[in-house]
């Protein structure tokens, strides 16, 4: 029973981390969390100067005694994801190619995933998430950019459509987990 509850809890945490792979067009069960109120909360309360932005920073903070609840980790993850749209708009205004913008969106989402996992205190839960990704993608940290491109090509899409999908999918998260986390 305890093992089943752990798996369920891991699945609930995992859903938002994987949403980008299945929500390219805002798939069922996905949403963008980008209201002005949410953005203000992110700036004021969540993404502070002490918030880790890399796995190494999270590890150092944990060594220094920091710890976060799953809801706090989720908040950091969502606030990071919410910034992708603005960053993409800035890159577009600077004349960056669609591929460069897609790579930037992917990198932000991927970094949010691995940093969030580094912040988590339940190492068994992290191991379950990584095992699931290893089985699904052949990589413990989720799909690579190249895997997403190849998936798009296998679906018959051209590069422009693939890159646009990557930018969009990087901004979508699980509606159910967002609600569970007080959204």
Image (cartoon, grey):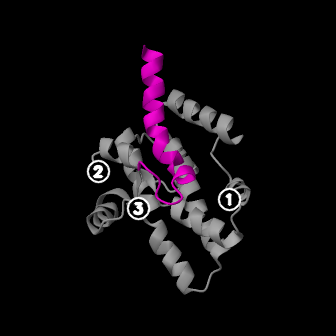
Question: Which residue does the numbered mark 1 point to in the structure image?
Answer: 152
Prevailing secondary structure of the magenta residues: helix
Q: Residue at x 62, y 81 (%)?
A: 96
Q: Residue at x 51, y 80 (%)?
A: 90
The answer to whether any part of residue 164 appears in the image is: yes
- Span shown in magenta: 1-29
Question: Which residue does the numbered mark 3 point to in the structure image?
Answer: 49
User: Which badge, 3 or 1, comes first in the chain's sequence?
Assistant: 3
Above or below residue 173? Residue 85 is below
Q: Callout 1: helix, strand or loop?
A: helix
Number of other residues with Cα within 10 Å of mark 1, as a class: few under 14, some 14 to 19, many 20 or more: some
Number of other residues with Cα within 10 Å of mark 2, as a class: few under 14, some 14 to 19, many 20 or more: few
Question: Which residue does the numbered mark 2 point to in the structure image?
Answer: 183
Q: Callout 3: helix, strand or loop?
A: loop
Q: Where is residue 45 shown, x and y percent of the image?
A: 30, 58
Q: Residue at x 58, y 54 (%)?
A: 110
Relative to the observer, which residue lies in front, 91 or 120?
Answer: 91
Inspect the magenta stretch and tell me whether residue 71 lies in it. Answer: no
Q: Where is residue 15 shown, x and y percent of the image?
A: 47, 42
Inspect the magenta stretch and tell me whether residue 14 lies in it. Answer: yes
Q: Residue at x 50, y 30 (%)?
A: 125
Question: Where the N terminus falls, by quadrant?
Answer: top left
């Amino acid at each position: 029973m305890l093992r089943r509850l752990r798996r369920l809890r891991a699945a609930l945490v995992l859903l938002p981390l994987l949403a980008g792979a299945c929500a390219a067009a805002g798939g069922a069960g996905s949403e963008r969390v980008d209201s002005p109120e949410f953005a203000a909360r992110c700036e004021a309360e969540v993404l502070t100067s002490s918030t880790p932005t890399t796995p190494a920073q999270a590890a150092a903070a944990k060594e220094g005694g920091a710890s976060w609840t799953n809801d706090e980790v989720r908040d950091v993850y969502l606030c990071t994801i919410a910034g992708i749209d603005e960053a993409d708009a800035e890159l577009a205004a600077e004349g960056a190619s669609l591929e460069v913008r897609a790579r930037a969106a992917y990198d932000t989402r991927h970094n949010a995933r691995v940093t969030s996992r580094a912040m988590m205190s339940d190492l068994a839960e992290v191991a379950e998430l990584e095992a699931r990704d290893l089985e699904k993608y052949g990589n413990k940290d989720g799909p690579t950019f190249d895997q997403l491109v190849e998936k798009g090509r296998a679906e018959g899409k051209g590069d422009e459509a693939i890159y646009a999908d990557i930018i969009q999918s990087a901004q979508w998260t699980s509606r159910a987990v967002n609600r569970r986390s007080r959204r």
